[in-house]
Image: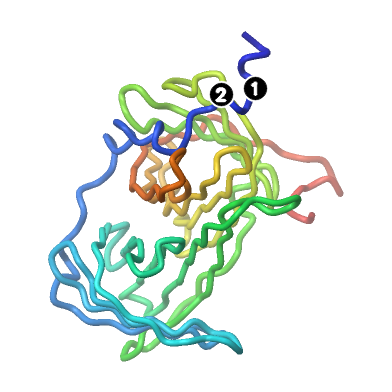
């Protein structure tokens, strides 16, 4: 049994995780239907969106010396995270190797642009690479703290239930790593340590994103840790299916805090 668990060639492909994984996903919100917004990042990226029922027209220019303007019209799922706080998730039909996670805080005027790009894994490089840019929403007066990287989750161990069949636990190790273990479901018994990025949106609400090295995929989630006994999460898995095509599906989870580790003086991983 141990040898089988260690044989990563036998691990499920991305599409093998999708069936039933959305059982605890919240119902998408229609709050933004009919509304147009533009966000501009600190690095010069600009994303304009106009929401319709289940779809979004978009135009974007990503910051950088070789940036070009692109536009399109794609399906979208919008999730209400908290009052005036939303996650919009879309996969570009004209650029299928890219998916965008757009966090919009209509109360503070702040936003976060998350871009996931699927390529080929290499030494020291996962197949999915992710880029996050704090931004502001045009026409709204920014107030409060902008989204920023955080070490707030380090030391926590959380049990996540995605459906009646799927459950995992996460151990948040450092600013760069976390360990996951499947407790129930088709990956039961599997575990690994993968790269992460964590951004604070509001006190207790975080973007938690990871990039897997065995399965060519990455995830961007928004997790609400304010109630340790009723943590919630919603997000996307994006990557390559076993047939070479693109996998992109949203999911949700309900969690609870199991424990918190405390390190001795000078040994806190938050300082890595």
Which residue is at 47% across, 47% downward?
Answer: 240
**Dot 1 alpha-carbon crowd within 10 angstroms: few under 14, some 14 to 19, many 20 or more:** few
Q: Nearer the viewer, residue 229 or 111?
A: 111
For this rendering, which residue is in front, 216 or 82? 216
Quadrant in which the N terminus is drawn: top right
Q: Is residue 177 above or below residue 138?
A: above
In the picture, the quarter occupied by the C terminus is: bottom right
Element assignment for label 2: helix
Residue 10 numbered mark, or none: 2
| Residue positioned most to the right | 266
User: Is mark 1 in CB contact (under 8 Å) with mark 2?
Assistant: yes
Q: In the displayed structure, does residue 172 sit left or right of residue 27?
A: right
Give coordinates of residue 224: x percent, y percent.
Answer: 41, 50
The spot of residue 49 in percent (x, y) is 28, 78
Task: Give above or below for 27 relative to 69.
Answer: above
Q: Nearer the viewer, residue 266 or 117?
A: 117
Q: CA distance from mark 1 to mark 2?
A: 6 Å
Q: Which residue is mark 1?
A: 7
- Residue at 47%, 80% (x, y): give it: 135
- Whether 67 is drawn above or below 97: the answer is below
User: Viewed as shown, does residue 115 lie left or right of 37?
Assistant: right
Residue that appears at 48% across and 66% down: 115
Where is residue 43 shown, x and y percent of the image?
A: 56, 85
| Residue 46 percent across, percent down from the top left | 43, 85
SS under mark 1: loop
Q: Residue at x 35, y 89 (%)?
A: 138
């Amino acid at each position: 049994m141990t040898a089988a668990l260690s044989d990563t060639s036998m691990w499920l492909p991305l599409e093998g995780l999708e069936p039933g994984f959305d059982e605890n996903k919240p119902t998408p919100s229609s709050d933004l239907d009919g509304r147009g917004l533009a966000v501009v990042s600190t690095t010069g990226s600009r994303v304009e969106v106009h929401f319709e029922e289940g779809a979004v027209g978009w135009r974007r220019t990503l910051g950088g010396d070789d940036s070009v303007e692109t536009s399109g019209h794609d399906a979208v799922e919008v999730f209400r995270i908290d009052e005036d706080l939303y996650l919009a998730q879309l996969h570009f039909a004209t650029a299928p190797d890219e998916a965008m996670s757009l966090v919009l805080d209509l109360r503070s005027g702040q936003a976060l642009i998350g871009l996931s790009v699927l390529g080929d894994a290499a030494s020291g490089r996962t197949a999915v690479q992710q880029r996050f840019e704090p931004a502001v929403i045009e026409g709204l007066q920014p107030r409060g703290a902008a989204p920023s990287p955080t070490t707030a989750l380090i030391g926590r161990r959380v049990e996540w239930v995605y459906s009646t069949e799927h459950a995992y636990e996460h151990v948040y190790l450092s600013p760069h790593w976390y360990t996951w273990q499947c407790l129930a479901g088709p990956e039961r018994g599997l575990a690994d340590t993968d790269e992460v990025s964590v951004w604070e949106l509001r006190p207790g609400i975080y973007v938690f994103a990871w990039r897997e090295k065995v399965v060519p995929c990455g995830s961007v989630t928004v997790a609400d840790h304010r109630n340790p006994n009723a943590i919630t999460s919603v997000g996307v898995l994006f990557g390559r299916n076993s047939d070479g095509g693109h996998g992109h599906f949203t999911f949700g989870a309900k969690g609870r805090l199991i424990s918190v580790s405390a390190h001795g003086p000078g040994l806190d991983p938050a300082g890595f």
